[in-house]
Image (cartoon, coloured by chain):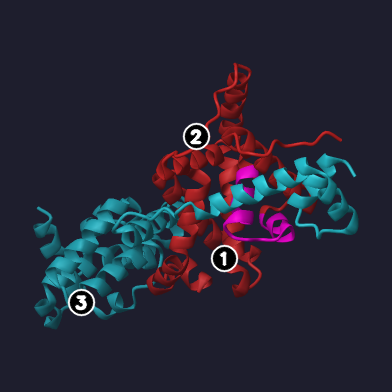
Amino acid sequence: MLERARRGERRALDELVEAHRLPLWRFAMRLTGNGAEADDLAQDTLVRALRALEGFRGEAALRTWLLRIASNLWIERVGKAERRRRDDREVEEVAPPDPPRLVEGLLARERQDELRRAVAGLPPRQRATLVLKVYHEMTFEQVAATLGCPVGTAKANYHHALSRLRRELGAIGASGGAT
Amino acid sequence: MRCEQVQRALRSDEALSGELAEHLAGCESCRASWAADEALVAELRELPNAEPPSGHPRSFRRGVEARLRAETRPAAPSRNVAPVGLAAAAALLVLLGAVALLPLSEGTGAGAPPEAPMALLSPEDLTPGDLIRLEEAALTLAPASGEEIGAQVWATALGGETEWIGELSDEEQRALLEALDEDLG
């Protein structure tokens, strides 16, 4: 199907797009947090997949392969800008800490927005790792294969992502013990 | 085992080994941290999926097609201009023209193929917006066959084959092109 779609066969392209549009778009939304950017990322991913057919190793792994392309594309695209923004935020973090954000009775919608903002504030690789781990329920081996990094790096990224989110969200249970 | 090691291990999907379990049993801080991780992940999983806007399948597909076309445009080799390139270029016109002028297809003749209209609407000159308008025009003019014609328009622009273009005589092509030219004002 990929090969036929690449040659411009309308039906094959339709099938490919329809089969992967929604999961790919949702994944892109988790990464970008923005509909237009998610469109761009998901569309670029499919085009890159068609262009890089030789890198594809079998129909069963197609979705994982697409996630890999999307992740790498996104990390490559926004990594630099994200790092710059993160640096800005880290400067802000030197300021006196905000009051605890978790307030009993907080509206669910506000909490959801807060979670989304916190996830959006993660560095790209941490965010991609978190999304693959939490929403795609991948093992660390699968995450590592998808992002093209060592398993240890995937574990470290996940660890840092959770630590950062908890710090950002003021979640209960302070990280780090006494011993 | 230090607390930091324990918390990293818990986040690494490691099985609760004896040492790990022993530490957890005696460390309230690590138990609280583990529970906080679990609660956070559960909250994240409960975040509702964003849904794309209505009309997304169509707009998304067009976005992909436009990207493919944009990628193939600079790579289009000039050696394809004739005869395949001309046929593809003409196909764009004929595909749309054929919708409105199907009766003309019964005519015969051996006139020279028109050149100006082909040059006017080479696939490489068309924007995605042009393709969309062509497709929509095909659907409007011939609801029954417009979808297939629209598909052919896109296939042509994307470098696909349009088999039936070769079935039209030069006279038929010229008639269709002239009619289309007139239609475009």
Query: Of the numbered discs in the image, which one, if any, rests on residue B145?
Result: 3
At 67% from the left edge and 52% from the top edge, which residue is drawn?
Answer: A147
Q: Secondary structure at mark 2?
A: loop
What is the count of numbered marks? 3
Q: Amino acid at mark 3?
A: Ser
Give the extent of the magenta segment.
A126-146
Q: Colour of chain A?
A: red
In the shown orientation, is residue B72 left or right of residue A97?
left
Q: Colour of chain B?
A: cyan
- Packing grade of label 3 (10 A; few <14, some 14-19, many >=20) is few
Amino acid type at image mark 1: Arg
Q: Nearer the viewer, mark 1 or mark 2?
A: 2
What residue is pinned by disc 2?
Answer: A103
Q: Tell me the chain of label 3.
A: B
Q: Is residue B153 left or right of residue B146?
A: right
Dot 2 crowding, Cα within 10 Å, few <14, some 14–19, many 20+: few
CA neighbours of label 1 inside 10 A, class few (<14), some (14 to 19), many (20+):
some
User: Magenta region's main secondary structure?
Assistant: helix
